[in-house]
Image (cartoon, grey):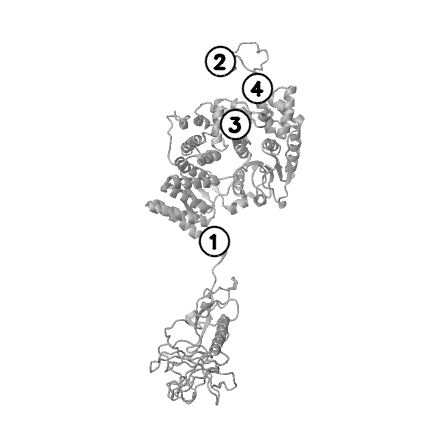
Amino acid sequence: MDRTQGQVDPAEPSSGPARVVTLTAGDFTLTVNPVDGSEIEPLRPGAERARPRRRDSAGRAARDTAARPPVLPGAPASARLTPAREEERARLVRLLSHGRSVRLTGPSGSGRSGLLDAVAADCAGVAPDGVVRLSGYGQQQPGELLHALYAAVYEAPDERPLRPDREELLARVREIGAVVLLDDLEMGGAALDELLRATPECAYLLAATPDTKAPSDASHLEEVFLGGLGRAEAVEFLEAGVGRALTEEETAWAGDLRFASEGLPLRFVQAAALLRQRDELNGTRGGDEDEEPGVFEERPRDAAFVPLPTLAEGAAPAELLASRVSESARAVLRIACALGGELPHHAHLPALVGDTHADAAVAELLGCGLLTPVGTRYRLASGVARQLEEVGYGDPAAEEARTAARHYAWWTGHASVTPERVAAEADAVLAALAGADVVAAVLLARTAAPAFAASLHWEAWERVLRSGAEAARKAGEVAEQAYFHHELGVLALCEGRLERARAELEASIGLKGALADKRGTVAGRRALALVTDREAAGAAAVSPPLRLAPPVGGAVALAAPGPVAALGPAVPVAATGPTVPVALAAPVGPRASEAVTAVVPARRDAPANLAEVFAEPFPMSLKPSPAPALAPPVAARPVAGSRKRTVLLAAAGALTVAALGTVVALAVGSGDEETTPAGPGPKVSSTTPDVPAAGTDTAGEPGGNDSAGDPADPAGSGSGSGAVTEAEPGATTPGEGADAPTPGVSRGAGAKPSGGATPSRKPPVVPPKTSPVASPPTTSTSPSSSPSASVTPTATPTPTTSVSAPTATGTGTGT
């Protein structure tokens, strides 16, 4: 018989129709479809979400029963507190009755869960919403705990499950007034502060271990430390567990055990189980010692006397206790070790073990102290898993995990199993998923994920989806991988994580497109459209659009000084004027119900480096540009944004002056070179640059093209530029045409032109009538208020450098 089908009725169908569950998640309607994937859509316009109602006393009692561990077959074990625990119990009840929150700190096995059960019975009528039991095992963030608290106090008014969004959740839990018993707390610091701030009307009893992160100083929690048992209390506790008085030898052994275990009650529960097993093995039965054992009795005929356990066996008793329990109980321990300490519900054990009476093994192990209650389930006690793995109980872990995964894959997908039952078994399902092979993991995640989604246990839903996506990737199941990514995107969209939702949905759409799954692609694109709408709505809520009116009638208005105008493109102010940046016209005035928003836009065309800064004053392109029509400069008002252009031009001038200084230094340093005179004679070296005579060109030849017919420029020095550039095609000499003076150049009366005037614009460049002869450029320098550049082609290849001395007339002397 298959172990996974041990308790299945052959007449019962193994599967049923797919469970399609529709629930409300915030502002969305979510349809959980196990076959094709979940579908999400916004709530219909005008549809109001039903308000949840508080549970009555009967509903709270049923909820409290569901929050406790399952009742095991057999006689229930009686829980009794020691006198020291009774004092701590009264103190805790007194603090909670006054609305104070308490943090109960104690090591594992100190009896925290038993003390919480006793306090819960005393605080039943203290708060208006009663007592709420929660488990913090595996919870590192307060979000899921707040949802669990909400579900414990409120219930949906109709059959449709309701999971509120964050805003509604915080508004509902703020109104809850209850005594919350939170066992196995694993968070502290800011996360714990967030939980306490969200529920100001609740009084908490938080049970944690000493290694849990401490709360902050702003939490104002009362600290109660739970210590070990004293010697007398330990002996009394042990006698109650054994059911008889201890002998002197056993009393001394109990004292030594108390010293070795620091008085932890769990160690004495296990020690009581060791003494009971020893009594059974020794046959300590009153009046039956001389009788012959029967055939069907387990006690052998020649039973050896079993001594007291050693101190080491008493401090780590898991191996010895496991060796004396039934075979079904040992099989259950192997399953628990394979699942990381998690124990499945006792109803699953007959199918997992293959024994119809395996469900009774849980009560046997609980009485031995090998199990401990955690929330609504049981798991191996502290230190038991490690002790059992050392003696070989963890060897068949892979086989046991695969068996559990296949069993849960069948069980979670069965139509008769409600999502609430699957959620109660979440930890065991997740443990089986983590230990199974990739094929079994994909199958289990595919069937368990819809059940977790329908049960509103979304933390387990996300963990199953991520594990399933990883297993599908390793197994090469592209279709299943696309399903898991789609579900992760839908989950992220419901929780408001839009970036994560977009990434998951785009991955799912890509995989479904590769599979030619048109229906799945359409569903993914619909969900992705909702993500886009949410992003747009969020952007509008954070930064509303500016109310900037476009230009009216195509006219451009100058920007008035102020922070309201936005810079626009540079356009001419007049038909023949300089180009200045202008601003778009702002509205005339705000409406009565609107506020004026100051807009300071960031320029997107800001230069990133010096090359971009000087690209406009000094273009690097050699192509000629059309010469615009020149006109006298028009005095314009200061325009917003023109200051930056002025600063850039000033920086360009400063850089040009620095370049001119470098050229002058190079020219002076190269004055030692020999110059070749026009006539015969010895070569004369001079450090003073030559100045060309009147009526000659720069090469010393009369009748040059540069000075012909130009009475205003007898030296033929051209524009006197201090910067040297290459000659462009279409350039002409400055002296061509006596009636056409160089525009933008001012000459003093009776002085030679020095080119020191500052032109309003660069002089126009026109092509020469005769092509110039290639020769090195002529450089002339004179101090002026601003630099200007021109190119003078020469007729001969003999270079001559002329330097103007800084004299009052702007001319220099030469030799």
Q: Name the residue under label 4.
A: 278
Q: What residue type is labelled 2?
A: Phe
Dot 4 lies on which element?
helix
Label 3 – label 4 distance at C-alpha: 28 Å
Q: Name above or below for residue 808 compared with residue 489.
A: below
Q: Which of 635 and 658 is in front in this view?
A: 658
| Sequence order check, earlier mark of 3 and 4 | 3
Q: Are marks 4 and 1 in contact (CB under 8 Å)?
A: no
Q: Mark 2 points at which residue?
A: 296
Q: What residue type is labelled 4?
A: Arg
- The residue furthest front is 682
Name which quarter of the figure residue 263 lies in.
top right
| Sequence order check, earlier mark of 2 and 4 | 4
Label 1 – label 2 distance at C-alpha: 77 Å
Label 2 – label 4 distance at C-alpha: 20 Å
Q: Give the foreground label among 4 and 1.
A: 4
Question: Where does the image place residue 506, in percent across and percent down from the top left?
Answer: 39, 49
Q: Give the foreground label among 3 and 4.
A: 4
Q: Do the residues labelled 1 and 2 touch (CB within 8 Å)?
A: no
Q: Which amino acid does label 1 sit on?
A: Gly
Classify residue 87 as left or right of residue 578.
right
Q: Name the residue under label 3.
A: 71
Question: Where does the image place residue 320, in percent across and percent down from the top left?
Answer: 54, 24
Q: Tell me the tag on residue 538.
A: 1
| Sequence order check, earlier mark of 1 and 3 | 3
Question: Where does the image place residue 601, in percent across and percent down from the top left?
Answer: 49, 64
Neighbour tally class for label 1: few under 14, some 14-19, many 20 plus, Cα within 10 Å: few
